[in-house]
Every structure is written in structure tokens, then in C-alpha cells.
Amino acid sequence: LALLDEPTEGLMPELEEKLGRVLEETLANNRSVVVTGQNLGFIENVASKVYWLESGRVKNVVKGR
């Protein structure tokens, strides 16, 4: 299990795309990754589930890719 907090913060778009590919490969190998962040587009592209928190409570669960 890996935990990534704001992994795309400050990255150039090219590096963000590369990180997305690395995460997809990791998940394809039956590994688990928890990603926290505000870049919802990135997270939805790589995640199987997205938990939306508001004021410390789960507001919505969205299926990702």
C-alpha cells in the first residue's frame, strides 16, 4: 500500500502524465494506492473509487476509471 499526498502539486504537465502512467502500471500489478489531493481530474483518471470529503465527512463516492 502506498499513500500519496498531493502528488501532482507543482509538477509540469509532462511529469503529471508520467506519474499517471506509473500509477496505472502499479494498479495493474494488484497494488493499492491511496491518493489525496485537489487535482480531481488526475485522481479520477487513475482511481477506481473517489471519495469526496467535505468538512471531514464523506459526501460522495464516485467511480473512477
Image (tube, rainbow, N blue to C red):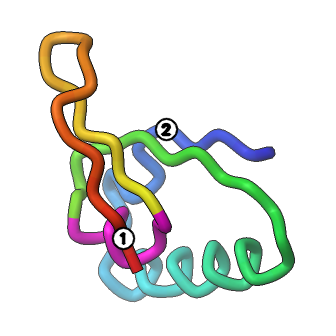
Depth check, front residue: 46 or 59: 59
For badge 1, the amino acid type reads Gly
Instruction: Please report the residue visible at 24 percent of the width from the left and 39 percent of the height from the top.
Output: 52
Q: Residues within 10 Å of mark 2 (few under 14, many from 20)?
A: few
Q: Nearer the viewer, mark 1 or mark 2?
A: 1
In the displayed structure image, the side of residue 32 where residue 29 appears, left or right: right
For badge 2, the amino acid type reads Asp
- Quadrant location, the C terminus: bottom left
In the displayed structure image, the side of residue 5 where residue 39 appears, left or right: left
In the displayed structure image, the side of residue 52 where residue 10 appears, left or right: right
Instruction: Indicate whether residue 26 is drawn in magenta.
Output: no
Numbered label attached to residue 5? 2
Depth check, front residue: 49 or 10: 49
Instruction: Please report the residue visible at 24 percent of the width from the left and 56 percent of the height from the top.
Output: 39
Instruction: Please report the residue visible at 39 percent of the width from the left and 59 percent of the height from the top.
Output: 8
Q: CA distance from mark 1 to mark 2?
A: 18 Å
Instruction: Please report the residue visible at 47 percent of the width from the left and 66 percent of the height from the top.
Output: 47
| Magenta-colored span | 41-48
